[in-house]
Amino acid sequence: MTSSETKNSGALASYLDIIKTPSIQVLLLGTGFLLMMLFVYMGVLTTFDDALFNVISEAGNVSGWKEDALRDITALGSNTALIFVTISVAGALAMAGEKKKALTFLIAVAVGIATTFLLKAGIDRPRPPLPMQDVSVYTQSFPSAHATLSTLVYFYIAYLLTYFTQNASVKVWIYMAATFLVFCIGLSRILLGVHWPSDIIAGWFAGGSMAAFCFYIIKWKRKLRIKGEG
């Protein structure tokens, strides 16, 4: 490897380390969400949403086992499923002596739910006109609660699971699995015809920033504990 290649590799590693910093993730993802919200409010994404929605949603007009699979995937991001998962994981953390992590998780999800539905009511974006399946929806469209909360919950769980291993490949696998699950949940909402693509993308940004903020809090508390022990 030449000196220039070594220098470039070192620079890339430095950039990756910066991106992996929770505070930077909060800033980047939070900015992404705010930009998406601004673009939706200004109507900048209308053409993009219409074009992509028409392409993707037609694939959701299915029946039989495909319809069941689609409903099963979207159910993994439902409020009921995510609240159950959150309480179960928080209870396990509390019993394992990780009460602060459990409390952080519970507060984050509660704040995430409240914030998401306040944004829905405030922005008041209509749903797409023709759902592909018989799906009941009771709230406005932006941002997607399924995308927002599933990103928060499943990435928080992925973060917790990485504590059990030092193997980098296993950590990458855990985060890839969480990413794939969250992506499928978000995609299922467009396939069902109940969300615009920008609702989902904004939800991913919002949920990701909330999860990153949790990681920041955990890291900050760990530093305080280390200083206190020192």
Image (cartoon, rainbow, N blue to C red):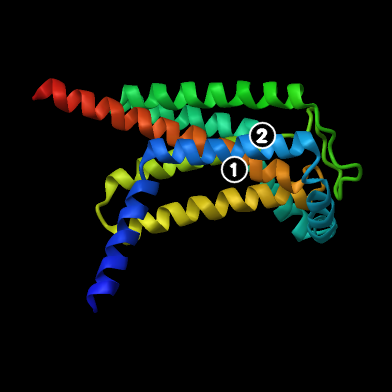
Q: Nearer the viewer, residue 93 or 52?
A: 52
Q: Is residue 38 visible?
A: yes
Q: Is residue 144 visible?
A: no
Q: Which residue bears the numbered disc 2?
A: 145
Q: Which residue bears the numbered disc 1?
A: 204
177 w.r.t. 127: above or below = below
Q: Position of residue 129 (x, y in %)?
A: 91, 42
Callout 1: 10 Å neighbours few (<14), some, many (20+)?
many
Q: In the picture provided, is 103 more to the left or to the right than 14?
A: right
Locate residue 62: give its quadrant.
bottom right
Identify the residue shown where x is 34% and y is 58%.
Answer: 170
Identify the residue shown where x is 52% and y is 52%.
Answer: 179
Q: CA distance from mark 1 to mark 2?
A: 10 Å
Amino acid of disc 2: Ala
Q: Position of residue 223 (x, y in %)?
A: 22, 29
Identify the residue shown where x is 72% and y is 53%.
Answer: 70
Quarter of the figure with the C terminus: top left
Amino acid of disc 1: Trp
Q: Most extreme residue toward the left, as rendered? A: 230
